[in-house]
Image (cartoon, helix red, strand yellow):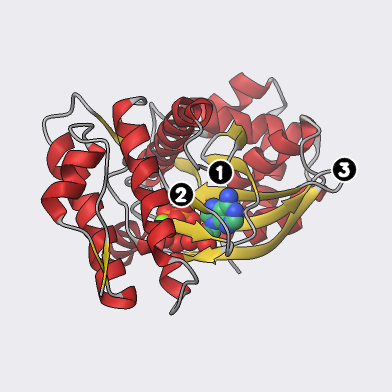
């Protein structure tokens, strides 16, 4: 079971005092890798016996870990706070099935009271390197635990910021409804990754649409995705969406041009290899940089 599933299946049993304790962890996580009992009693104003009892429960539920200096919040604990946040704001009623469990994020289905379908993206940046470090140092090592969570909150903020700039420009990005901690609540897109298509009815139009979005993001939003490929484009048979923006850089970034051209090359390579559609890389680069207004595409 993934940590979000651990959180979702236990979150309903949490009492307000448990949430207060988890919030105390959250408040302290940028300063400490491990939180002592005294801090928690002081912050929550609960009796030490009660805090201890609740910590044992939270530990059993997989929301925190114990270590020699105190306790640390783990991903499932932060997931629980994020889910509680979305529910309290009346945005979702619960979490559903996994849509994409990957290296850097776990994405789940969710539904609102009125039946709107959402995708929740929980950030897991650096999960693999964190796991390797944990294996080396022992399971309960608190080292980097909180730092890792803080890093994921930052990543969610960055993606939220990029999408908020791009959406008003009509760039095809998933609409972000809200952010809670390291989790983004987005409109659910009913499509598949472009990488999964072995044929397209009108590949040329799809390529044009992607490059128009890359160009508009760069020229009007001043943003380069920097991880664009067929694995970060969703397609529903009619239109595309460019997803996954946490690593996006601004036009002013010293590598922005290199990253922009790499994004374009990844997409051109995919269309050449899979659909035998060619566009001259330098011409495509001039187009996305706004130095030419037309884009020539040749089908073999
Ligand atoms: N708004 C959405 N609607 C529907 N599906 C989505 C949405 N956002 C993401 N997904 C699905 O979740 C997967 C992972 O999302 P994303 O690419 O944003 O994260 P990631 O960091 O690349 O994760 P991974 O390591 O799995 O690639 C996507 O490939 C896509 O299938
Ligand atoms: Mg991705």
Q: Residue furthest bottom?
A: 198
Q: Quadrant of the C terminus?
A: bottom left
Query: Does residue 63 appear left or right of residue 53 in this picture?
Result: left
Query: Where does the image place residue 285, in percent across and percent down from the top left?
Result: 17, 44
Is the CB–ligand 1 distance for label 1 below 8 Å? yes
**Residue 285 badge:** none
Query: Where does the image place residue 228, in percent across and percent down from the top left?
Result: 32, 52
The residue that label 3 is drawn on is: 113
133 in relation to 250, above or below = below
The residue that label 1 is drawn on is: 174
Is the CB–ligand 1 distance for label 2 below 8 Å? yes
Q: Nearer the viewer, residue 64 or 66?
A: 64
Is the CB–ligand 1 distance for label 3 below 8 Å? no
Query: Where does the image place residue 172, in percent across and percent down from the top left?
Result: 50, 42
Q: CA distance from mark 2 to mark 3?
A: 25 Å
Circles 3 and 1, Cβ within 8 Å, touching? The answer is: no
Image point 32% across, 76% down: which residue? 274
Q: Quadrant of the N terminus?
A: bottom right
The residue that label 2 is drawn on is: 243
Q: CA distance from mark 3 to mark 1?
A: 20 Å
Q: Nearer the viewer, residue 162 or 21?
A: 162
Circles 1 and 2, Cβ within 8 Å, touching? The answer is: yes
């Amino acid at each position: 079971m993934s940590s979000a599933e651990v959180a979702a299946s236990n979150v309903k049993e949490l009492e307000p005092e448990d949430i207060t304790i988890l919030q105390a962890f959250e408040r302290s996580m940028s300063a400490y890798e491990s939180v002592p009992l005294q801090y928690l009693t002081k912050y929550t104003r609960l009796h030490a016996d009660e805090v201890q009892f609740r910590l044992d429960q939270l530990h059993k539920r997989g929301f925190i870990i114990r270590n020699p200096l105190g306790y640390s919040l783990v991903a499932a604990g932060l997931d629980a706070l994020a889910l509680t946040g979305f529910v309290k704001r009346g945005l979702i009623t619960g979490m559903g099935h996994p849509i994409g469990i990957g290296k850097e994020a776990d994405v789940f289905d969710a539904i609102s009271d009125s039946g709107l379908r959402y995708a929740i993206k929980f950030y897991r940046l650096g999960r693999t390197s964190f796991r390797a470090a944990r294996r080396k140092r022992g399971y309960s090592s608190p080292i980097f635990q909180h730092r890792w969570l803080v890093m994921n909150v930052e990543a969610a903020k960055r993606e939220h910021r990029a999408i908020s700039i791009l959406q008003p420009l009509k760039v095809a990005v998933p609409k972000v409804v809200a952010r809670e901690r390291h989790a983004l609540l987005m409109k659910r897109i009913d499509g598949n990754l472009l990488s999964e298509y072995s044929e397209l009815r009108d590949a040329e139009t799809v390529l044009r649409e992607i490059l128009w979005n890359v160009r508009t993001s760069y020229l009007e939003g001043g943003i380069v995705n920097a991880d664009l490929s067929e694995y970060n484009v969703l397609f529903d048979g009619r239109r595309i969406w460019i997803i996954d923006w946490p690593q996006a850089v601004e036009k002013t970034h010293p590598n922005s041009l290199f990253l922009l051209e790499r994004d374009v090359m990844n997409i051109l390579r995919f269309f050449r290899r899979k659909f035998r559609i060619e566009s001259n890389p330098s011409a495509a680069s001039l187009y996305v940089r706004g130095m030419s207004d037309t884009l020539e595409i040749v089908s073999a």
